[in-house]
Image (cartoon, grey):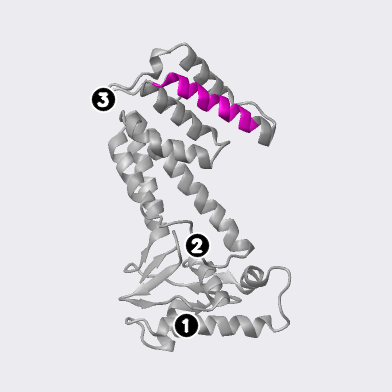
Protein backbone atom coordinates (compact mmCIF):
# COMPACT_ATOMS: atom_id res chain seq x y z
CA UNK A 1 0.00 0.00 0.00
CA UNK A 2 1.25 3.47 -0.87
CA UNK A 3 0.28 6.05 1.78
CA UNK A 4 0.93 9.72 0.99
CA UNK A 5 0.21 12.56 3.41
CA UNK A 6 2.65 15.20 2.16
CA UNK A 7 0.05 16.82 -0.07
CA UNK A 8 -3.54 15.67 -0.66
CA UNK A 9 -4.27 12.46 1.27
CA UNK A 10 -3.72 9.44 -0.96
CA UNK A 11 -3.61 5.75 -0.09
CA UNK A 12 -3.91 3.04 -2.68
CA UNK A 13 -2.73 -0.35 -3.82
CA UNK A 14 -2.42 -1.24 -7.50
CA UNK A 15 -4.75 1.56 -8.44
CA UNK A 16 -7.42 0.77 -5.84
CA UNK A 17 -7.93 3.76 -3.53
CA UNK A 18 -8.48 3.46 0.20
CA UNK A 19 -9.67 7.05 0.66
CA UNK A 20 -13.32 7.42 1.76
CA UNK A 21 -15.34 10.02 -0.09
CA UNK A 22 -17.21 11.20 3.04
CA UNK A 23 -15.49 13.94 5.08
CA UNK A 24 -15.57 12.42 8.58
CA UNK A 25 -14.28 8.95 7.63
CA UNK A 26 -11.53 10.62 5.59
CA UNK A 27 -10.62 12.78 8.59
CA UNK A 28 -10.54 9.70 10.82
CA UNK A 29 -8.31 7.87 8.34
CA UNK A 30 -5.93 10.84 8.34
CA UNK A 31 -5.66 10.64 12.13
CA UNK A 32 -5.01 6.90 12.02
CA UNK A 33 -2.33 7.03 9.31
CA UNK A 34 -0.61 9.94 11.05
CA UNK A 35 -0.17 7.48 13.92
CA UNK A 36 0.78 4.33 12.02
CA UNK A 37 1.33 1.28 14.23
CA UNK A 38 0.25 3.23 17.31
CA UNK A 39 -3.01 2.86 19.22
CA UNK A 40 -5.32 5.85 18.79
CA UNK A 41 -7.81 5.87 21.63
CA UNK A 42 -11.54 6.25 21.15
CA UNK A 43 -11.32 9.48 23.15
CA UNK A 44 -8.70 10.83 20.73
CA UNK A 45 -10.87 9.88 17.75
CA UNK A 46 -13.87 11.66 19.29
CA UNK A 47 -11.79 14.76 20.07
CA UNK A 48 -10.47 14.90 16.53
CA UNK A 49 -13.84 14.41 14.85
CA UNK A 50 -16.06 16.54 17.06
CA UNK A 51 -13.77 18.52 19.40
CA UNK A 52 -15.94 19.80 22.29
CA UNK A 53 -19.30 18.99 20.71
CA UNK A 54 -19.59 15.21 20.20
CA UNK A 55 -23.03 13.87 19.29
CA UNK A 56 -24.90 11.65 21.72
CA UNK A 57 -24.46 8.82 19.22
CA UNK A 58 -20.68 9.33 18.98
CA UNK A 59 -19.75 5.73 19.87
CA UNK A 60 -22.02 4.19 17.26
CA UNK A 61 -21.09 6.82 14.68
CA UNK A 62 -17.36 6.24 15.24
CA UNK A 63 -17.85 2.49 14.78
CA UNK A 64 -19.69 3.20 11.54
CA UNK A 65 -16.75 5.26 10.28
CA UNK A 66 -14.31 2.50 11.23
CA UNK A 67 -16.46 -0.01 9.34
CA UNK A 68 -16.48 2.24 6.27
CA UNK A 69 -12.68 2.41 6.28
CA UNK A 70 -12.44 -1.38 6.72
CA UNK A 71 -14.76 -1.90 3.78
CA UNK A 72 -12.44 0.26 1.68
CA UNK A 73 -9.49 -1.79 2.92
CA UNK A 74 -11.30 -5.02 2.01
CA UNK A 75 -11.28 -3.93 -1.64
CA UNK A 76 -7.50 -3.76 -1.77
CA UNK A 77 -6.00 -6.66 -3.80
CA UNK A 78 -3.82 -8.12 -1.06
CA UNK A 79 -6.64 -8.13 1.50
CA UNK A 80 -9.85 -8.94 -0.32
CA UNK A 81 -12.09 -9.46 2.70
CA UNK A 82 -13.44 -7.64 5.72
CA UNK A 83 -11.74 -10.17 7.99
CA UNK A 84 -8.36 -9.39 6.47
CA UNK A 85 -9.12 -5.66 6.70
CA UNK A 86 -9.47 -6.05 10.48
CA UNK A 87 -5.84 -7.15 10.66
CA UNK A 88 -4.80 -3.83 9.12
CA UNK A 89 -7.22 -1.57 10.97
CA UNK A 90 -7.22 -3.41 14.25
CA UNK A 91 -9.29 -2.83 17.37
CA UNK A 92 -6.89 -2.67 20.29
CA UNK A 93 -8.30 -2.15 23.80
CA UNK A 94 -10.21 1.11 23.82
CA UNK A 95 -8.87 2.29 20.50
CA UNK A 96 -7.68 1.46 17.00
CA UNK A 97 -4.32 0.92 15.32
CA UNK A 98 -3.54 1.10 11.60
CA UNK A 99 -0.93 -1.59 10.88
CA UNK A 100 1.71 -1.41 8.18
CA UNK A 101 4.07 -3.96 6.66
CA UNK A 102 7.56 -3.68 5.22
CA UNK A 103 5.97 -3.66 1.75
CA UNK A 104 4.04 -0.46 2.46
CA UNK A 105 5.35 2.90 1.22
CA UNK A 106 4.83 5.88 3.54
CA UNK A 107 5.99 9.29 2.32
CA UNK A 108 6.33 10.77 5.83
CA UNK A 109 8.70 7.96 6.84
CA UNK A 110 10.72 8.34 3.63
CA UNK A 111 10.94 12.09 4.24
CA UNK A 112 12.20 11.57 7.81
CA UNK A 113 14.72 8.90 6.73
CA UNK A 114 16.16 11.14 4.00
CA UNK A 115 16.41 14.10 6.35
CA UNK A 116 18.21 12.01 8.98
CA UNK A 117 20.64 10.63 6.39
CA UNK A 118 21.28 14.18 5.16
CA UNK A 119 22.10 15.35 8.67
CA UNK A 120 24.64 12.55 9.01
CA UNK A 121 26.23 13.62 5.73
CA UNK A 122 26.28 17.29 6.72
CA UNK A 123 27.83 16.41 10.09
CA UNK A 124 30.81 14.95 8.21
CA UNK A 125 30.99 18.06 5.96
CA UNK A 126 29.62 16.25 2.93
CA UNK A 127 27.48 19.12 1.68
CA UNK A 128 26.90 17.63 -1.76
CA UNK A 129 25.35 14.42 -0.42
CA UNK A 130 23.45 16.33 2.23
CA UNK A 131 21.96 18.72 -0.32
CA UNK A 132 20.95 15.85 -2.62
CA UNK A 133 19.27 13.91 0.20
CA UNK A 134 17.41 16.98 1.42
CA UNK A 135 16.29 17.78 -2.12
CA UNK A 136 14.95 14.23 -2.47
CA UNK A 137 13.15 14.58 0.86
CA UNK A 138 11.53 17.88 -0.11
CA UNK A 139 10.43 16.54 -3.49
CA UNK A 140 8.11 14.15 -1.65
CA UNK A 141 5.95 17.15 -0.76
CA UNK A 142 3.16 17.63 -3.32
CA UNK A 143 1.65 20.62 -1.50
CA UNK A 144 0.52 21.33 2.08
CA UNK A 145 0.26 18.12 4.09
CA UNK A 146 -3.25 16.59 3.99
CA UNK A 147 -4.46 19.37 1.68
CA UNK A 148 -8.21 19.13 1.23
CA UNK A 149 -8.76 16.80 4.19
CA UNK A 150 -10.76 18.13 7.17
CA UNK A 151 -8.58 18.54 10.26
CA UNK A 152 -9.55 18.67 13.91
CA UNK A 153 -7.31 19.66 16.85
CA UNK A 154 -5.12 16.53 16.87
CA UNK A 155 -4.45 16.45 13.15
CA UNK A 156 -3.83 20.22 13.09
CA UNK A 157 -1.19 19.84 15.79
CA UNK A 158 0.59 17.16 13.77
CA UNK A 159 0.40 19.27 10.63
CA UNK A 160 2.17 22.12 12.42
CA UNK A 161 4.99 19.72 13.29
CA UNK A 162 5.22 18.39 9.74
CA UNK A 163 5.36 21.89 8.26
CA UNK A 164 8.09 22.87 10.73
CA UNK A 165 10.08 19.78 9.71
CA UNK A 166 9.65 20.71 6.04
CA UNK A 167 10.80 24.29 6.61
CA UNK A 168 13.81 23.15 8.64
CA UNK A 169 14.82 20.69 5.91
CA UNK A 170 14.44 23.47 3.34
CA UNK A 171 16.68 25.83 5.32
CA UNK A 172 19.28 23.08 5.73
CA UNK A 173 19.21 22.32 2.00
CA UNK A 174 19.72 26.00 1.16
CA UNK A 175 22.57 26.18 3.68
CA UNK A 176 24.22 23.18 2.03
CA UNK A 177 23.79 24.79 -1.40
CA UNK A 178 25.40 27.99 -0.11
CA UNK A 179 28.35 25.94 1.11
CA UNK A 180 28.62 24.53 -2.39
CA UNK A 181 28.79 28.03 -3.92
CA UNK A 182 25.32 27.92 -5.52
CA UNK A 183 24.38 31.44 -4.43
CA UNK A 184 23.35 32.60 -7.92
CA UNK A 185 20.96 29.67 -8.35
CA UNK A 186 19.33 30.35 -4.96
CA UNK A 187 18.35 33.98 -5.53
CA UNK A 188 14.93 33.40 -7.07
CA UNK A 189 13.93 30.70 -4.59
CA UNK A 190 15.06 32.70 -1.57
CA UNK A 191 13.37 35.89 -2.75
CA UNK A 192 10.07 34.00 -2.99
CA UNK A 193 10.55 32.32 0.39
CA UNK A 194 11.34 35.59 2.15
CA UNK A 195 8.20 37.16 0.70
CA UNK A 196 6.16 34.31 2.19
CA UNK A 197 7.95 34.39 5.56
CA UNK A 198 8.52 38.09 6.31
CA UNK A 199 9.82 37.60 9.87
CA UNK A 200 11.82 34.37 9.47
CA UNK A 201 15.38 35.48 10.15
CA UNK A 202 17.24 32.46 8.83
CA UNK A 203 15.81 32.76 5.32
CA UNK A 204 16.59 36.49 5.31
CA UNK A 205 20.17 35.77 6.38
CA UNK A 206 20.52 33.22 3.60
CA UNK A 207 19.15 35.67 1.02
CA UNK A 208 21.47 38.41 2.26
CA UNK A 209 24.46 36.10 1.91
CA UNK A 210 23.40 34.89 -1.55
CA UNK A 211 22.93 38.49 -2.73
CA UNK A 212 26.26 39.62 -1.31
CA UNK A 213 28.09 36.71 -2.94
CA UNK A 214 26.33 37.54 -6.21
CA UNK A 215 27.76 41.07 -6.15
CA UNK A 216 24.62 42.79 -4.83
CA UNK A 217 25.54 44.19 -1.40
CA UNK A 218 23.04 47.07 -1.62
CA UNK A 219 20.19 44.62 -2.15
CA UNK A 220 21.47 42.51 0.74
CA UNK A 221 21.29 45.59 3.00
CA UNK A 222 17.77 46.26 1.72
CA UNK A 223 16.71 42.75 2.80
CA UNK A 224 17.97 43.52 6.30
CA UNK A 225 16.10 46.82 6.42
CA UNK A 226 12.83 45.18 5.36
CA UNK A 227 13.27 42.42 7.92
CA UNK A 228 13.93 44.97 10.64
CA UNK A 229 10.76 46.84 9.71
CA UNK A 230 8.68 43.65 9.66
CA UNK A 231 9.99 42.51 13.04
CA UNK A 232 9.24 45.90 14.57
CA UNK A 233 5.71 46.11 13.14
CA UNK A 234 4.64 42.54 13.78
CA UNK A 235 6.57 41.53 16.89
CA UNK A 236 7.99 44.72 18.38
CA UNK A 237 11.55 43.34 18.39
CA UNK A 238 14.89 44.02 16.74
CA UNK A 239 16.81 41.56 14.56
CA UNK A 240 18.89 39.04 16.47
CA UNK A 241 22.56 39.50 17.22
CA UNK A 242 23.37 37.04 14.43
CA UNK A 243 21.53 39.17 11.86
CA UNK A 244 23.13 42.37 13.18
CA UNK A 245 26.54 40.73 12.87
CA UNK A 246 25.77 39.76 9.28
CA UNK A 247 24.60 43.32 8.56
CA UNK A 248 27.89 44.73 9.85
CA UNK A 249 29.83 42.17 7.83
CA UNK A 250 28.07 43.23 4.62
CA UNK A 251 28.72 46.91 5.40
CA UNK A 252 32.41 46.24 5.93
CA UNK A 253 32.74 43.75 3.03
CA UNK A 254 34.12 41.18 5.44
CA UNK A 255 36.15 38.56 3.51
CA UNK A 256 34.49 35.84 5.59
CA UNK A 257 31.37 36.38 3.48
CA UNK A 258 33.11 35.54 0.22
CA UNK A 259 32.06 32.38 -1.63
CA UNK A 260 33.72 29.31 -0.13
CA UNK A 261 36.61 27.54 -1.73
CA UNK A 262 35.43 24.14 -2.99
CA UNK A 263 37.41 22.37 -0.28
CA UNK A 264 36.88 24.73 2.64
CA UNK A 265 33.79 26.32 4.12
CA UNK A 266 34.46 29.35 6.42
CA UNK A 267 32.26 29.32 9.49
CA UNK A 268 33.77 32.14 11.52
CA UNK A 269 30.64 34.28 11.45
CA UNK A 270 28.21 31.38 11.74
CA UNK A 271 26.41 32.56 8.61
CA UNK A 272 26.39 29.39 6.52
Vertical arrangement, residue 269 with respect to residue 185, above or below: above
Asked if residue 112 lies left or right of residue 228, the reply is left
Residue 4 image offset from top left, x and y in percent: 41, 64
In-front residue for pair 246/81: 246
Measure how far apart labels 1 and 3 are at the Cα level. 55 Å
Element on which disc 2 rests: loop
Pick whichever of labels 1 and 2 is earlier in the sequence.
1
Q: Which residue corresponds to mark 2?
A: 147
Dividing the picture into quarters, in which one does residue 262 lie? top left
Vertical arrangement, residue 234 with respect to residue 8, above or below: above
Image quadrant for the C terminus? top left
Q: Which residue corresponds to mark 1?
A: 70
Q: Main secondary structure of the magenta part?
A: helix
In-front residue for pair 265/186: 186
Identify which residue is drawn at 38% across, 84% down: 75
Q: Which residue corresponds to mark 3?
A: 262
The answer to whether the residue labelled 1 contacts the one labelled 2, judged by CB atoms less than 8 Å apart, is no
From where the camera sits, is residue 123 visible? Answer: no
Measure how far apart labels 3 and 2 are at the Cα level. 40 Å
Q: Which disc, if any, is residue 122? A: none
Report the span colored magenta.
216-231
Pick whichever of labels 3 and 2 is earlier in the sequence.
2
Asked if residue 9 lies left or right of residue 153, the reply is left
Amino acid sequence: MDIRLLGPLEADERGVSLIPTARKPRQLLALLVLNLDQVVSVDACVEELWDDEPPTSMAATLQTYILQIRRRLAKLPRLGSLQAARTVLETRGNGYVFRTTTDDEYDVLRFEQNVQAARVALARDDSLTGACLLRDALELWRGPALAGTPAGPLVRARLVGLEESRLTALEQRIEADLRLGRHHELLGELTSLVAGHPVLENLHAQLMLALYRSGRPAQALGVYDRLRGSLDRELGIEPSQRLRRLHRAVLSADPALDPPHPATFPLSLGLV
